[in-house]
Amino acid sequence: MGRILETELYPPVKAFLVEQGYEVKAEVGSADIVACREGADPVIVELKTGFTLSLFHQAVVRQSVTDAVYVAVVRGKGRQFLQSLKKNLQLARRLGLGVITVRLPDGVVEVHLDPAPFTPRKSKPRKDRLLREFARRVGDPNTGGSTRTTLVTAYRQDAIRCAEHLSTNGPSRGADVARATGVATATRMMADDHYGWFERVERGIYALTPKGLASLGTPD
Protein backbone atom coordinates (compact mmCIF):
# COMPACT_ATOMS: atom_id res chain seq x y z
CA MET A 1 0.00 0.00 0.00
CA GLY A 2 1.39 3.38 -1.00
CA ARG A 3 1.81 6.40 1.21
CA ILE A 4 -1.46 8.05 2.21
CA LEU A 5 -1.78 11.70 1.19
CA GLU A 6 -3.68 14.42 3.04
CA THR A 7 -5.52 15.21 -0.19
CA GLU A 8 -7.27 11.81 0.06
CA LEU A 9 -9.19 13.08 3.09
CA TYR A 10 -10.62 16.06 1.24
CA PRO A 11 -13.35 14.43 -0.92
CA PRO A 12 -15.06 12.50 1.90
CA VAL A 13 -14.84 15.42 4.35
CA LYS A 14 -16.18 17.82 1.72
CA ALA A 15 -19.05 15.47 0.88
CA PHE A 16 -19.90 15.15 4.56
CA LEU A 17 -20.03 18.92 5.04
CA VAL A 18 -22.04 19.45 1.85
CA GLU A 19 -24.63 17.02 3.23
CA GLN A 20 -24.89 19.31 6.27
CA GLY A 21 -25.81 22.20 3.99
CA TYR A 22 -22.38 23.89 3.78
CA GLU A 23 -20.65 25.34 0.75
CA VAL A 24 -17.13 23.96 0.90
CA LYS A 25 -13.86 25.23 -0.58
CA ALA A 26 -10.30 24.04 -0.12
CA GLU A 27 -7.11 25.95 0.64
CA VAL A 28 -8.75 29.27 1.48
CA GLY A 29 -6.09 31.44 3.04
CA SER A 30 -4.02 29.10 5.18
CA ALA A 31 -6.90 26.75 6.05
CA ASP A 32 -7.19 23.30 4.47
CA ILE A 33 -10.99 23.40 4.33
CA VAL A 34 -13.45 26.24 4.88
CA ALA A 35 -17.18 25.52 4.99
CA CYS A 36 -19.83 28.25 5.10
CA ARG A 37 -23.56 28.12 5.72
CA GLU A 38 -25.97 31.02 6.04
CA GLY A 39 -26.54 32.06 9.61
CA ALA A 40 -23.61 30.07 11.00
CA ASP A 41 -19.96 30.75 11.73
CA PRO A 42 -17.54 29.33 9.17
CA VAL A 43 -16.19 25.85 9.86
CA ILE A 44 -12.49 25.20 9.38
CA VAL A 45 -11.04 21.72 9.08
CA GLU A 46 -7.32 20.97 9.17
CA LEU A 47 -6.30 17.70 7.50
CA LYS A 48 -3.48 15.33 8.44
CA THR A 49 -2.88 11.65 7.84
CA GLY A 50 -2.38 11.23 11.61
CA PHE A 51 -2.33 13.12 14.88
CA THR A 52 0.67 15.41 15.24
CA LEU A 53 1.57 18.35 17.41
CA SER A 54 1.79 20.58 14.34
CA LEU A 55 -1.80 19.65 13.48
CA PHE A 56 -2.99 20.98 16.83
CA HIS A 57 -0.78 24.06 16.45
CA GLN A 58 -2.42 24.83 13.10
CA ALA A 59 -5.91 24.28 14.47
CA VAL A 60 -5.32 26.56 17.45
CA VAL A 61 -4.19 29.35 15.11
CA ARG A 62 -7.44 28.94 13.14
CA GLN A 63 -9.41 29.66 16.33
CA SER A 64 -8.56 33.33 15.81
CA VAL A 65 -10.99 33.17 12.86
CA THR A 66 -13.78 30.95 14.22
CA ASP A 67 -14.61 28.75 17.17
CA ALA A 68 -15.74 25.95 14.82
CA VAL A 69 -12.36 24.35 14.13
CA TYR A 70 -11.88 20.62 13.56
CA VAL A 71 -8.90 18.38 12.96
CA ALA A 72 -9.44 15.44 10.61
CA VAL A 73 -7.20 12.38 10.41
CA VAL A 74 -7.22 8.98 8.76
CA ARG A 75 -8.94 6.38 10.94
CA GLY A 76 -6.46 3.63 11.75
CA LYS A 77 -7.00 0.07 12.91
CA GLY A 78 -6.47 -1.78 16.15
CA ARG A 79 -5.94 -0.98 19.78
CA GLN A 80 -2.98 1.33 19.18
CA PHE A 81 -5.07 3.72 17.11
CA LEU A 82 -7.95 3.64 19.60
CA GLN A 83 -5.57 4.51 22.43
CA SER A 84 -4.12 7.35 20.35
CA LEU A 85 -7.61 8.57 19.50
CA LYS A 86 -8.63 8.57 23.16
CA LYS A 87 -5.59 10.60 24.23
CA ASN A 88 -5.92 13.07 21.40
CA LEU A 89 -9.62 13.53 22.09
CA GLN A 90 -8.67 14.55 25.62
CA LEU A 91 -6.19 17.08 24.23
CA ALA A 92 -8.63 18.41 21.63
CA ARG A 93 -11.37 18.80 24.25
CA ARG A 94 -9.06 20.94 26.39
CA LEU A 95 -8.15 23.06 23.37
CA GLY A 96 -11.77 23.52 22.34
CA LEU A 97 -11.26 21.71 19.03
CA GLY A 98 -13.39 19.17 17.19
CA VAL A 99 -12.09 15.80 15.96
CA ILE A 100 -13.04 13.93 12.79
CA THR A 101 -11.77 10.59 11.49
CA VAL A 102 -12.01 9.37 7.90
CA ARG A 103 -12.07 5.69 6.96
CA LEU A 104 -10.48 5.89 3.55
CA PRO A 105 -11.51 2.53 2.02
CA ASP A 106 -15.21 3.50 2.05
CA GLY A 107 -15.03 7.23 2.82
CA VAL A 108 -16.92 7.01 6.11
CA VAL A 109 -16.55 10.25 8.11
CA GLU A 110 -17.11 10.18 11.86
CA VAL A 111 -17.28 13.21 14.15
CA HIS A 112 -15.93 12.16 17.54
CA LEU A 113 -15.95 15.58 19.16
CA ASP A 114 -17.46 18.99 18.40
CA PRO A 115 -15.66 22.21 19.41
CA ALA A 116 -16.79 23.60 22.76
CA PRO A 117 -15.35 25.71 25.58
CA PHE A 118 -13.59 23.58 28.17
CA THR A 119 -13.31 24.11 31.92
CA PRO A 120 -11.18 21.45 33.65
CA ARG A 121 -12.88 19.62 36.49
CA LYS A 122 -10.70 19.75 39.57
CA SER A 123 -10.32 16.63 41.70
CA LYS A 124 -10.13 17.47 45.40
CA PRO A 125 -8.98 13.94 46.37
CA ARG A 126 -6.11 14.12 43.86
CA LYS A 127 -5.17 17.59 45.05
CA ASP A 128 -5.22 16.41 48.68
CA ARG A 129 -3.02 13.38 47.86
CA LEU A 130 -0.56 15.64 46.04
CA LEU A 131 -0.32 18.08 48.93
CA ARG A 132 -0.01 15.28 51.52
CA GLU A 133 2.85 13.72 49.59
CA PHE A 134 4.52 17.13 49.24
CA ALA A 135 4.19 17.84 52.97
CA ARG A 136 5.39 14.41 54.10
CA ARG A 137 8.37 14.14 51.78
CA VAL A 138 11.62 15.12 53.48
CA GLY A 139 13.83 17.37 51.35
CA ASP A 140 13.91 17.07 47.56
CA PRO A 141 15.49 13.65 46.86
CA ASN A 142 14.49 13.30 43.20
CA THR A 143 15.51 15.05 39.98
CA GLY A 144 12.69 16.48 37.88
CA GLY A 145 12.20 14.66 34.57
CA SER A 146 13.71 11.40 35.82
CA THR A 147 12.67 8.18 34.07
CA ARG A 148 13.63 4.54 34.53
CA THR A 149 14.79 5.17 38.05
CA THR A 150 13.33 4.49 41.49
CA LEU A 151 11.69 7.61 42.80
CA VAL A 152 11.90 8.45 46.47
CA THR A 153 8.39 9.00 47.82
CA ALA A 154 7.36 9.94 51.35
CA TYR A 155 6.25 6.31 51.79
CA ARG A 156 9.69 5.06 50.78
CA GLN A 157 11.37 7.54 53.14
CA ASP A 158 9.22 6.22 56.00
CA ALA A 159 10.12 2.64 55.06
CA ILE A 160 13.82 3.54 55.05
CA ARG A 161 13.52 5.01 58.54
CA CYS A 162 11.91 1.80 59.77
CA ALA A 163 14.58 -0.29 58.05
CA GLU A 164 17.37 1.80 59.57
CA HIS A 165 15.89 1.31 63.03
CA LEU A 166 15.71 -2.46 62.59
CA SER A 167 19.25 -2.51 61.19
CA THR A 168 20.54 -0.76 64.30
CA ASN A 169 18.33 -2.35 66.95
CA GLY A 170 17.50 -5.76 65.54
CA PRO A 171 13.98 -7.30 65.58
CA SER A 172 11.60 -4.82 67.20
CA ARG A 173 7.95 -4.33 68.05
CA GLY A 174 6.03 -2.21 65.60
CA ALA A 175 5.01 0.21 68.34
CA ASP A 176 8.66 0.72 69.32
CA VAL A 177 9.65 1.36 65.71
CA ALA A 178 6.83 3.87 65.33
CA ARG A 179 7.81 5.70 68.49
CA ALA A 180 11.53 5.80 67.66
CA THR A 181 11.18 6.82 64.01
CA GLY A 182 8.10 9.02 64.16
CA VAL A 183 6.47 6.85 61.48
CA ALA A 184 2.98 6.44 62.89
CA THR A 185 2.09 3.71 60.40
CA ALA A 186 5.26 1.67 60.99
CA THR A 187 3.46 -1.51 62.06
CA ARG A 188 1.11 -1.47 59.08
CA MET A 189 3.96 -0.62 56.73
CA MET A 190 6.11 -3.53 57.93
CA ALA A 191 3.12 -5.89 57.84
CA ASP A 192 2.23 -4.87 54.27
CA ASP A 193 5.91 -5.22 53.29
CA HIS A 194 5.51 -3.39 49.99
CA TYR A 195 9.24 -3.53 49.18
CA GLY A 196 10.05 -6.98 50.57
CA TRP A 197 12.24 -5.44 53.28
CA PHE A 198 10.44 -6.68 56.39
CA GLU A 199 9.41 -10.00 57.89
CA ARG A 200 7.43 -10.86 61.00
CA VAL A 201 9.47 -13.05 63.32
CA GLU A 202 6.95 -13.10 66.15
CA ARG A 203 3.55 -11.60 66.73
CA GLY A 204 4.00 -7.84 66.51
CA ILE A 205 7.79 -8.11 66.08
CA TYR A 206 9.52 -7.42 62.77
CA ALA A 207 13.01 -7.83 61.38
CA LEU A 208 14.82 -6.91 58.19
CA THR A 209 15.03 -9.35 55.28
CA PRO A 210 18.28 -9.70 53.31
CA LYS A 211 16.67 -7.45 50.68
CA GLY A 212 15.99 -4.88 53.37
CA LEU A 213 19.61 -4.96 54.51
CA ALA A 214 20.76 -4.63 50.91
CA SER A 215 18.52 -1.58 50.42
CA LEU A 216 20.51 0.17 53.15
CA GLY A 217 23.83 -0.91 51.72
CA THR A 218 24.33 -3.07 54.80
CA PRO A 219 26.10 -6.45 54.44
CA ASP A 220 23.86 -9.41 55.29
Image (tube, grey):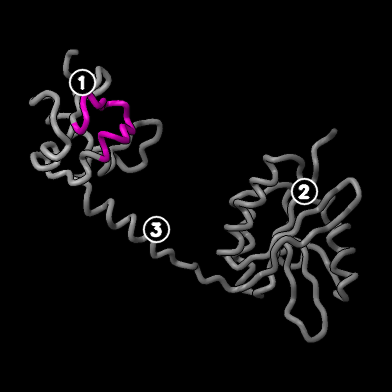
47 sits left or right of 178 in the view: right
Q: Is residue 193 magenta?
A: yes
Q: Where is mark 2, residue-wise?
A: 75
Q: Which residues are magenta?
A: 188-204
Callout 2 touching callout 1 (CB < 8 Å) = no
Mark 1 residue element? helix
Kindly identify the amino acid type of the residue bearing the numbered disc 1.
Leu
Residue 172 in view here = yes
Q: How many marks?
A: 3
Instruction: Name the N-terminal-most of marks 2 and 1.
Output: 2
Q: Nearer the viewer, residue 60 or 127?
A: 127
For discs 3 and 2, the disc positioned in front in the rendered view:
3
Dot 2, how many residues are within 10 Å of its Cα: few (below 14), some (14-19), or many (20+)?
A: some
Label 1 belongs to which residue?
A: 213
- Looking at the image, which residue is at 36% across and 37% down? 146
The CA span between labels 1 and 3 is: 34 Å
Relative height, residue 200 to residue 24 (above, below):
above
Q: Which mark is residue 126?
A: 3
Instruction: State the separation of the CA atoms marked 2 and 1.
Output: 53 Å
Q: From this viewpoint, is residue 30 visible? A: no
The amino acid beneath tag 2 is Arg
**What whole-number distance in Å separates the C-alpha atoms at marks 3 and 2?**
34 Å
